[in-house]
C-alpha cells in the first residue's frame, strides 16, 4: 500500500479536524478492510492512542469505544453475556482470532458492509452510535444515511437490558462470508429481528417485530406469522453465494428457530 | 518514517515507508520465519504476536507497532521446540509452511487458556489454515503440548 | 524391523517449526531485482502493439521483456519425462494471450514499487478474439485457441489443435453395446467436477543468480528439478550444463508445482540482466496463473444383472485443459486406468474421450489426478445402480470388486499417455478395508439413515478407490549412499520432498537396510548439481520408486562395507556378521567407526559411495475404502461431515504416522473439492471472481470434526520393505462417498461438484414436488 502522509492526531478534536479538512483522508481503525480495498492513500489518519479502545459499563448502557477490537468485545465480561452472548458470537464469527485482534467494532460499523455479521447483531441489540460531531444516532438510521456521511465514530452504545438473544450465521465454511445472517432479541416481550447478507446490508424487520410486540403471550402460530411478515417486508437477492429463493428458505427456517429459541424454554420448543 | 519496535526482546528501529506492512518490514530485517500465504488477511501464515496477541502482520501497518512488542517464532525457541516434539510424535508436520505462525498462535493460547478444550483450540486456531495435515494430528499434538507442564 | 514401520519424528520438522530459513524466497540473493509479470486481462486476445519505452525509462527498472525479446520456441511446462505426452503449445511469451492471467510482459526493478511502476507504464493494445469458455462447445469451435504452426505433439496423443482438441483417446475390451443390451438394469448419468485449486500454502516462487563459475543457479518451489533444468534450457536455448536447480523445502505442492511457473521467468531475467532476481507469485497469480485440476464431464454407463453382477462399464470423458495442454492426456487417461479396474470382472468396458482447449486457466497435475474425477463418477454410479437393483452397496462391491491375485485387461492397455503394463494384484486388501470401514463407521446402525434430532438425519455412504505407485518403465529414481568418517552416511536423492516428508521416509529405508539409526543418515534433496537423477515427486512414485532405489543403494553399501571389513579382519565376506555398528568374525571385531576412519585416514584409503537406480516394471496400486458419515438438516440442506473413516492398503507403512498424515491430508483436500471448492467465473469475461483466499474457501479446522484412519496389514513384495504408495490414494473417495451419504440421508443425488447445501435443498424441493427439475 502507498500512503503519502500519515497523521497521528493527539485528540479526538484534532482527528475530526483532520478528516473534516480533507474529504479524502482515510481513518485507520484496524485497517484490515482498508488493506483489502485501497492501494493508494494520500492521507491516513491513525486513530490509535485516543482512548477509543475502552469499553465502559454504565448503569443503563455499555459504551464500546470505536477502536475496541472484535476480540475485546467477544471476551468482555458483560458483553459476552449480554443477550445470551449474541454480540460476542457475531464477533467470534468473523474469521479467526488474528483478525478479531485487529478488526474493530467501529470499523465494522462505519464500513457498513453488506456481508456484515456484526451489524446484524448490533441492530438486534438496538445500538446507538456516538459521533464526534453528529448527535447520537440509531444504527438503523445510520445505515440508511451512510452514503456521504462523514464523521468520527467515537463509541457504540448498547442498552443493558435483560433479554434473550440469538445470532446465526449461515456460511459454507467457518472462514467464509455469510450466505445469510440473522439476530433476534426478546426483552420482556419486545422483539427486534435483524437479517443481513440477504445479500444486502443488515436490516430490521420492523413490521414483523411490531406485530409480535402487541401479542402476549406469543404462540408458535404467532411466530410463524412473524416469520412470514419478516420475509414479506425484507428484500432478498441472488449473488455468487446463493440464489434468492434459497436465501428466503434459509431465512424462513432459521428465523423460526431463532424466534422460538428466544420465546420458549427448551421443553416448549 | 522511523518506527521503534521491540522484536523478540530487542529494541529495533526501522526506517519504513508510511504504507509498509509489518510483514514486509520484518522479513526485510531478516526475520525470515514470517512468511506470506495470501495477502488478504485470510490464511494466518503471517501471524506474529503483538503484545502477546496473534495478529496478521500482512495487513498491520508497521508504524502502528511503534513502542509495542512483536514476537516471532525466533523469540520463543524453547516453546517452538516443545511443540515440534509433539508434532513429530503425531506426524502432524508436513510441509511446515504453516508451522511457525501456528506455534505463535498456540503459544498465545497457552498463555490465555492453558486448559482449552478441543473446540476452544479449533476456534482459536481456525484462522490458521493448513492445506497439508488434515488438521486432526495437529489437534492431538497441540493438546499434548498444552497438557505439558513446565 | 527397527526403523521402518516406526512412527519416528521427521528429520526437518523441528527446524521448520522454529522458523529456520528453508523455503525458496528465504534464499533470494541480497539486492535481488524484484520481478513482476504483466498479465492478460482478457481471456483471448492478440497483442497488436506493446509500448515499453516509458517503463524502461523509469529509474531502477532493469529490464522489460515482451514476446519480441524471445526466440519462438514451443515447449510444454508440464514437468514430465522427455519426450512429454503433453503438447508443445507454449512460448515463454507470445503475441497471443489465451486466458485471464496469461503472461504479457516481464519486468524487473530494484524493488517492488519500481517493478509495479514499470508494469503500470506498459501500454498494450489488444485485438479481442472470441473466447471459448464452455468445454462443451470447444470442439470444432470457429475460434481456435492454438492456430500457431509451432504447436505440436511429441508422439501421437490425439492432438488436433485446429479443432481445439489437445488430446484424445479411446479403448475397449469386449462389445460394450452388446453386453449393455443384455443387462437387466442400466444406469447412465453425467457427473461434473470443477477446477479445484491446489492452495499449497506457499505461493510459487523462484529466484536466480550467477555463481562464482558464472553458472545460473535457481532456487525454486518445484517438484521436478531435473525437468525444470531441461525445460529452461530448451525454452531459452541456454546450455543445460550451465544451469543448476535447487529445491529447498517446499511449502506444499500437491501436483501444482510439477509444472513450471516462476522458474523460467527468473531465468530469463537473470540471463538478460546478469543480476540476481526474485519472483514470488501473489496468491491471485497462484489462482489465476498457475494450474488447476482438470474439470471434467463424465458420462458413466453401468449395466448389471438382477443378481447384482456388474457386466459392463462405459465411460465417456470430456476434459477441459484450459489454455495450454499440460497433462491433458495423462490426467484424462488416469480417469480410466486407475478407476475402471476396480471392477475387473465385467464382460465389457469402454473408455473414450476428448481433452479440449478453452480460455481458462490451464489445468495441470493435482493429487489424485484423473482418478478423483473418475472415482466420483464411477462410485456415484455404482450406488445409483445399487439403488436401482435394491442391492446393498457393500454387498455389491464385495461381489464385483477386484481382489488379490486378480488382474484387469486395462492395466496392459492403458498407461499414462502410452500403453500400459500388465500386472496382477499381489496385494489387495480391499475386502478387509470394506469390512473394517463398515465397522468403524457403524454401517449397520447408520445405513442408510437414522433420525438424530428433529429435522436432522445421520447417514453413511462409502466408496472404494485405487491408485498406482509410479509410472512403470518411465519413472526412474536413483540414490547415492556415501560413507563418512566416524561411520555416518549421506543419502543423496533426487526425490523431491515437498512436504510429504519423503526425506524422512527414504532415510528410514536407508537406515533399516544399513542397520543403523536415523541420526546417522543425512539426507540431501534436491540439487541438480549434487543429487542423482529422479523424475520427481509425482504419480505417487516416491515411496515405491525412489524408495526402491534407496533400498538398493543402501543394501549395496552394506555389502561393500562387509567386504571391506572382511579384508581388514583377514577373512571372507560370508564369515562377517554386521549389525550396523560392529563387524564380527571369528578372526576379530571391528566397529564401523574404526573401519571408516581407517578407510579415510590410515590404510588403503578410499571413499565408499554407492549409486543405484530403480525403474519399476509395475505399479502396484494402493487401495482404500472411505466411509463418510454426514448429518443433513432436512429443512435447509445444510450438511455436517461428522466422521470420515479411511481404511487403506498401502502395503507396509514406512512411517505409520506420516502415512496417516498423507491419507488425512488427502481426505481433507477431497472433502474440500466435494463440499466447498469451486472457482467462480464471471459469466462473460472469463475472469475468476474468487481468485483469492477471501472467497475461495478450503476446509478449516472447524469443518473437520473427526477423521478415523487405519491401515490394512499388507506386504507388497516388489516394494521397499513391502511398501506401496500412499500420497494420492486419500484424496479419491470423498466426492463419491459424501455424495452417496447425502443421497442416503435425503434421497437427493448431486452429480455436479461441489455439493452445496443449496443444491441439496433444491433436490429436496424437487423430490417433494415443490419445484421443477433443472433450473
Ligand atoms: C479477511 C476478512 C474477512 C472478514 N470477514 C467478515 C465476516 O465474515 N463478517 C463480518 O461481519 N465482517 C468481516 N470482516 C470485516 C471485519 O469484521 C471488520 O469489519 C473490518 O475489518 C473493518 O474493521 P477495521 O477495524 O479493520 O476497519 P478499517 O479497515 O480500519 O476501516 C474500515 C472503514 O471504516 C472507517 N472507519 C474505521 N473506524 C472509524 C471511526 N472510528 N470513525 C469513522 N470511520 C471509521 C475507515 O475509514 C474505513 O472506511 C472481514 C474482514 C477481513 C479483513
Ligand atoms: S498472509 Fe497474512 S493472513 Fe495470509
Ligand atoms: S503443513 Fe503444509 S500448510 Fe500446514
Image: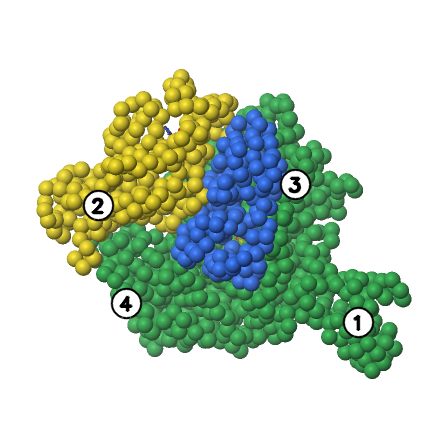
SS at mark 4 in the image? strand
Q: Colour of chain A?
A: yellow
Q: Nearer the viewer, residue A80 or B105?
A: A80
Report the residue that reaches farthest toward the bottom. Answer: C586
Of the numbered discs 4 and 3, the one sitting upstream in the chain is: 3
In space, the residues marked 4 and 1 are separated at their CA atoms by 66 Å
In space, the residues marked 3 and 1 are separated at their CA atoms by 43 Å
Front position among marks 4 and 2:
2
Residue beneath label 1, please? C591
SS at mark 1 in the image? strand
Q: Is residue C744 visible to the viewer in this orientation of the structure?
A: no
In space, the residues marked 3 and 2 are separated at their CA atoms by 59 Å
In space, the residues marked 4 and 3 are separated at their CA atoms by 57 Å
In space, the residues marked 2 and 1 are separated at their CA atoms by 79 Å
SS at mark 2 in the image? loop
- Tell me: is circle 4 under 8 Å from ligand 1: no
Q: Are marks 3 and 2 in contact (CB under 8 Å)?
A: no
Amino acid at each position: 500500500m502507498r500512503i503519502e502522509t500519515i497523521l497521528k492526531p493527539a485528540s479526538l478534536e484534532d482527528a475530526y479536524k483532520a478528516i473534516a479538512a480533507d474529504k479524502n483522508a482515510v481513518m485507520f481503525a484496524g485497517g484490515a478492510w482498508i488493506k483489502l480495498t485501497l492501494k493508494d492513500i494520500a492521507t491516513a489518519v491513525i486513530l490509535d492512542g485516543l482512548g477509543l479502545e475502552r469499553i465502559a459499563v454504565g448503569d443503563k448502557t455499555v459504551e464500546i469505544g470505536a477502536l475496541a477490537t472484535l476480540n475485546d468485545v467477544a471476551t468482555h465480561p458483560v458483553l459476552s453475556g449480554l443477550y445470551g452472548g449474541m454480540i460476542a458470537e457475531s464477533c467470534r464469527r468473523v474469521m479467526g482470532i488474528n483478525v478479531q485482534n485487529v478488526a474493530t467494532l467501529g470499523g465494522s460499523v462505519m464500513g457498513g458492509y453488506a456481508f456484515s455479521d456484526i451489524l446484524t447483531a448490533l441492530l438486534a441489540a438496538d445500538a446507538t452510535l456516538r459521533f464526534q460531531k453528529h448527535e447520537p444516532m440509531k444504527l438503523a438510521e445510520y445505515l440508511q444515511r451512510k452514503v456521504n456521511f462523514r464523521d468520527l465514530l467515537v463509541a457504540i452504545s448498547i442498552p443493558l437490558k435483560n433479554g434473550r438473544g440469538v445470532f446465526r450465521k449461515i456460511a459454507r465454511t467457518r472462514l467464509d462470508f455469510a450466505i445469510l445472517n440473522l439476530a433476534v432479541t426478546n426483552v420482556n416481550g419486545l422483539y427486534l429481528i435483524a437479517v443481513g447478507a440477504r445479500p444486502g446490508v443488515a436490516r430490521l424487520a420492523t413490521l414483523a417485530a411490531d406485530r409480535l410486540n402487541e401479542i402476549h403471550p406469543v404462540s408458535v402460530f404467532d411466530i410463524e406469522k412473524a416469520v412470514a411478515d419478516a420475509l414479506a417486508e425484507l428484500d432478498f437477492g441472488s449473488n455468487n453465494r446463493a440464489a434468492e429463493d434459497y436465501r428466503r428458505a434459509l431465512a424462513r427456517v432459521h428465523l423460526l428457530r431463532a424466534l422460538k429459541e428466544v420465546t420458549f424454554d427448551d421443553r416448549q420448543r | 518514517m522511523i518506527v521503534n519496535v521491540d522484536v523478540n526482546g530487542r529494541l529495533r528501529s526501522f526506517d519504513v515507508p508510511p504504507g509498509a506492512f509489518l510483514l514486509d518490514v520484518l522479513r526485510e530485517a531478516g526475520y525470515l520465519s514470517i512468511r506470506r500465504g495470501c495477502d488478504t488477511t485470510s490464511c494466518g501464515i503471517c501471524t506474529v504476536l503483538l503484545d502477546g496477541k496473534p495478529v496478521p502482520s500482512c495487513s498491520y501497518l508497521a508504524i502502528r507497532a511503534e513502542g509495542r512488542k512483536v514476537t516471532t517464532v525466533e523469540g520463543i525457541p524453547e516453546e517452538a521446540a516443545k511443540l515440534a516434539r509433539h508434532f513429530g510424535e503425531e506426524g502432524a508436520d508436513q510441509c511446515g509452511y504453516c508451522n511457525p505462525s501456528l506455534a505463535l498462535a498456540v503459544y498465545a493460547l497457552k498463555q490465555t487458556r492453558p486448559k482449552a478444550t478441543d473446540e476452544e483450540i479449533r476456534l482459536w486456531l481456525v484462522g490458521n489454515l493448513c492445506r497439508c495435515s488434515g488438521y486432526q494430528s495437529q489437534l492431538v499434538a497441540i493438546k499434548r503440548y498444552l497438557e505439558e507442564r513446565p | 524391523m527397527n526403523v521402518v514401520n516406526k512412527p519416528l519424528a521427521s528429520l526437518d520438522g523441528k527446524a521448520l517449526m522454529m522458523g529456520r530459513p528453508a523455503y525458496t524466497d528465504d534464499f533470494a540473493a541480497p539486492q535481488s531485482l524484484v520481478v513482476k509479470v504483466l498479465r492478460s486481462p482478457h481471456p483471448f486476445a492478440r497483442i497488436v502493439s506493446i509500448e515499453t519505452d516509458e517503463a524502461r525509462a523509469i529509474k531502477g527498472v532493469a529490464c522489460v521483456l515482451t514476446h519480441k525479446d524471445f526466440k519462438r520456441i514451443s515447449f510444454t511446462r508440464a514437468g514430465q519425462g522427455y519426450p512429454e505426452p503433453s503438447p508443445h503449445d507454449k512460448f515463454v511469451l507470445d503475441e497471443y494471450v489465451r486466458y485471464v492471467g496469461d503472461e504479457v510482459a516481464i519486468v524487473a526493478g530494484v524493488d517492488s514499487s519500481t517493478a509495479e511502476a514499470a508494469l503500470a507504464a506498459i501500454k498494450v493494445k489488444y485485438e479481442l478474439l472470441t473466447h471459448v469458455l464452455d468445454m462443451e462447445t470447444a470442439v470444432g469451435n470457429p475460434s481456435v485457441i492454438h492456430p500457431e504452426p509451432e504447436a505440436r505433439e511429441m508422439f501421437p496423443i490425439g492432438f488436433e489443435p485446429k479443432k481445439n482438441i489437445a488430446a484424445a483417446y479411446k479403448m475397449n475390451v469386449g462389445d460394450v453395446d452388446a453386453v449393455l443390451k443384455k443387462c437387466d438394469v442400466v444406469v447412465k448419468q453425467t457427473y461434473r467436477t470443477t477446477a479445484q485449486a491446489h492452495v499449497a500454502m506457499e505461493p510459487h516462487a523462484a529466484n536466480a543468480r550467477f555463481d562464482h563459475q558464472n553458472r545460473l543457479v535457481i532456487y525454486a518451489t518445484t517438484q521436478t528439478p531435473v525437468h525444470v533444468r531441461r525445460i529452461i534450457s530448451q525454452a531459452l536455448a541456454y546450455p543445460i550444463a550451465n544451469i543448476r536447480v535447487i529445491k529447498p523445502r517446499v511449502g506444499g505442492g500437491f501436483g501444482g508445482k510439477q509444472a513450471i511457473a516462476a522458474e523460467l521467468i527468473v531465468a530469463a531475467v537473470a540471463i538478460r540482466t546478469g543480476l540476481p532476481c526474485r519472483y514470488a507469485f501473489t496468491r491471485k497469480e497462484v489462482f489465476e496463473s498457475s494450474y488447476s485440476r482438470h474439470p471434467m464431464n463424465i458420462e458413466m454407463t453401468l449395466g448389471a444383472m438382477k443378481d447384482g453382477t456388474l457386466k459392463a462399464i462405459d465411460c465417456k470423458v470430456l476434459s477441459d485443459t484450459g489454455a495450454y495442454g499440460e497433462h491433458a492426456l495423462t490426467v484424462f487417461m488416469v480417469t480410466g486406468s486407475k478407476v475402471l479396474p476396480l471392477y475387473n470382472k465385467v464382460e465389457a468396458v469402454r473408455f473414450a474421450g476428448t481433452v479440449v482447449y478453452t480460455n481458462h486457466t490451464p489445468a495441470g497435475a493435482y493429487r489424485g489426478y484423473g482418478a478423483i474425477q473418475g472415482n466420483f463418477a464411477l462410485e456415484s454410479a455404482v450406488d445409483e445402480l445399487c439403488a436401482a437393483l435394491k442391492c446393498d452397496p457393500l454387498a455389491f462391491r464385495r461381489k464385483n470388486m477386484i481382489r488379490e491375485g486378480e488382474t484387469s485387461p486395462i492395466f496392459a492397455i492403458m498407461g499414462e499417455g502410452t500403453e500400459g503394463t500388465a500386472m496382477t494384484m499381489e496385494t489387495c486388501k480391499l475386502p478387509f478395508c470394506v469390512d473394517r470401514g463398515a465397522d468403524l463407521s457403524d454401517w449397520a446402525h447408520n445405513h442408510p439413515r437414522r433420525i438424530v434430532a428433529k429435522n436432522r438425519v445421520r447417514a453413511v455412504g462409502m466408496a472404494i478407490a485405487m491408485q498406482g505407485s509410479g509410472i512403470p518403465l518411465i519413472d526412474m529414481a536413483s540414490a547415492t549412499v556415501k560413507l563418512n568418517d566416524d561411520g555416518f552416511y549421506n543419502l543423496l536423492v533426487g526425490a523431491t520432498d515437498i512436504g510429504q516428508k519423503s526425506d524422512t521416509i527414504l532415510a528410514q529405508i536407508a537406515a533399516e537396510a544399513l542397520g543403523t539409526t536415523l541420526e546417522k543418515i543425512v539426507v540431501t534433496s534436491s540439487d541438480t548439481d549434487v543429487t542423482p537423477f529422479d523424475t520427481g515427486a509425482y504419480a505417487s512414485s516416491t515411496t515405491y520408486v525412489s524408495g526402491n532405489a534407496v533400498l538398493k543403494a543402501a543394501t549395496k553399501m552394506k555389502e561393500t562395507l562387509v567386504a571391506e571389513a572382511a579384508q581388514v579382519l583377514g577373512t571372507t565376506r560370508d564369515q562377517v556378521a554386521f549389525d550396523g555398528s560392529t563387524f564380527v568374525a571369528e578372526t576379530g571385531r571391528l566397529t564401523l567407526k574404526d573401519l571408516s576412519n581407517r578407510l579415510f585416514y590410515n590404510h588403503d584409503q578410499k571413499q565408499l559411495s554407492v549409486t543405484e537406480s530403480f525403474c519399476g516394471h509395475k505399479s502396484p496400486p494402493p487401495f482404500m475404502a472411505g466411509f463418510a458419515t454426514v448429518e443433513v438438516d432436512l429443512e435447509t440442506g445444510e450438511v455436517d461431515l461428522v466422521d470420515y473413516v479411511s481404511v487403506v492398503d498401502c502395503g507396509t507403512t514406512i512411517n505409520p504416522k506420516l502415512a496417516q498424515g498423507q491419507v488425512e491430508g488427502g481426505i481433507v483436500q477431497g472433502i474440500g473439492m466435494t463440499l466447498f471448492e469451486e472457482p467462480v467465473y464471471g459469466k462473460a469475461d472469463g475472469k475468476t471472481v474468487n481468485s483469492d483466499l477471501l472467497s475461495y474457501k478450503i476446509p478449516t479446522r472447524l469443518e473437520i470434526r473427526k477423521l478415523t484412519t487405519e491401515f490394512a496389514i499388507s506386504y507388497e513384495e516388489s516394494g521397499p520393505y513391502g511398501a506401496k504408495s500412499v500420497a494420492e490414494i486419500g484424496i479419491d473417495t470423498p466426492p463419491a462417498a459424501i455424495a452417496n451419504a447425502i443421497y442416503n440421508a435425503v434421497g437427493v443425488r448431486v452429480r455436479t461438484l461441489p455439493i452445496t447445501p443449496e443444491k441439496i435443498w433444491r433436490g429436496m424441493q424437487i423430490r417433494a414436488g415443490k419445484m421443477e427439475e433443472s433450473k
